[in-house]
Image: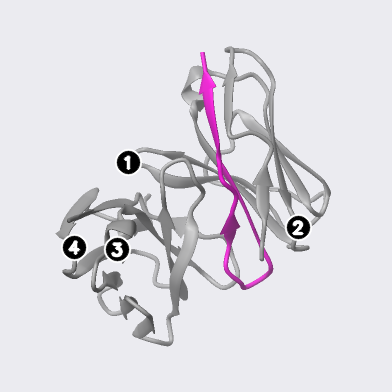
Amino acid sequence: DVKVTQSSRYLVKRTGEKVFLECVQDMDHENMFWYRQDPGLGLRLIYFSYDVKMKEKGDIPEGYSVSREKKERFSLILESASTNQTSMYLCASKRLATTQYFGPGTRLLVL
Amino acid sequence: DQQVKQNSPSLSVQEGRISILNCDYTNSMFDYFLWYKKYPAEGPTFLISISSIKDKNEDGRFTVFLNKSAKHLSLHIVPSQPGDSAVYFCAASQGAQKLVFGQGTRLTINP
């Protein structure tokens, strides 16, 4: 059974703080993804990674960075949190050409 | 540039009746389509998929139809049950590339 876990379910941060969101998958998947979900906008891709130390920008990378030092772990970093980054953040992973599996999500509130 | 569109933000259906969720896409290079289901405060879970070489795929109460000429896919749920109440996202990909998601449709099943 595929398991994708995210470090926090809920986070409250202040404007300007550096925020780390961690994602871990236990199925040796090559590909990992970070999305944000906002009402009426669906899931928008922030960054993705095809392999360790590799990263690609998604559709909305501004204000975010990522790190993939180990195959099972993909971190999303908000360098200086802003109120417009209040959102639900979803991590996902998959093997090549297979179904994408999501973690439970982190609801982030930036005050 | 919304390549995948779900034009109905919400849908309400009587328990036991058929639910039909629709999705349109613009990129003719998409060759794989998926539906995900999402409950509040949880990550999306994979429901059903279809390859562009098919026009129908069925899994229990769920059937996905693909009309390539119209660039349209639909998800049929029959009979609808209260536990089907959730947000449904359609998604599309080209090859083994990243998924592009629609905005989501909130389905409510009324008893």
Front: mark 1 or 2: 2
Tell me the element at label 1. loop
The kind of residue on which mark 1 rests is Gly
Instruction: List the residue tagged with mark 4.
Output: B15
Q: Which mark is residue A26?
A: 2
If you read the primary sequence from the N terminus, does the residue marked by circle 4 or circle 3 appear first?
A: 4
> Where does the image place residue A27, in percent across and percent down from the top left?
74, 63
Chain of the residue under label 1: A
Q: What amino acid type should be assigned to the residue bearing mark 2?
A: Asp
Magenta residues, start to end: A90-111
Residues at marks 4 and 3, common chain? yes
Q: Please tell me whether residue A101 belongs to the stretch shown in magenta.
A: yes
Q: Nearer the viewer, residue B96 or B21?
A: B21
Label 3: which secondary element: strand
| Chain to which mark 3 belongs | B
Foreground disc of the pair 3, 2: 2
Contact between labelled residues 3 and 4, with CB atoms less than 8 Å apart: no
